[in-house]
Image: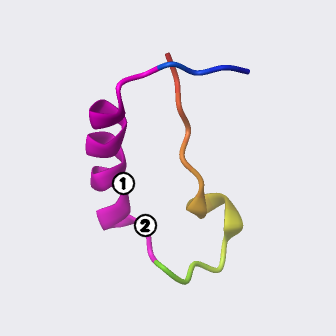
Amino acid sequence: MRVILERSNLLKSLNHVHRVVERRNTIPILSNVLLSA
């Protein structure tokens, strides 16, 4: 799969998620991010 996007948009969205996600989570699925188009 090939994904083309603007880096600034991705970083802005990931910064929002980064604030919520814990560093040491016990449930592995919580450390992933779902991308949808």
Q: Which mark is residue 17?
A: 1
Disc 2 residue type (three-letter)? Val
Answer whether labels 1 and 2 touch (C-beta < 8 Å). yes
Residue identifier under label 2: 21
* Majority secondary structure in the magenta region: helix
| On-image quarter of the N terminus | top right
Which residue lies at the image location 65% right of the left edge and 80% below the top edge? 26
SS at mark 1 in the image: helix
Quarter of the figure with residue 20: bottom left
Q: How far apart are labels 1 and 2 at the CA level?
A: 6 Å
**Mark 1: few, some, or many residues within 10 Å (few <14, many ≥20)?**
some
Residue 19 in which image quadrant: bottom left
Q: Nearer the viewer, residue 20 or 12?
A: 12
Chain part drawn in magenta: 5-22
* Residue ranking furthest to the bottom: 24
- Label 2 residue SS: loop
**Where is residue 22 shown, x and y percent of the image?**
44, 75
Left/right placement of residue 2 relative to residue 8 reads right
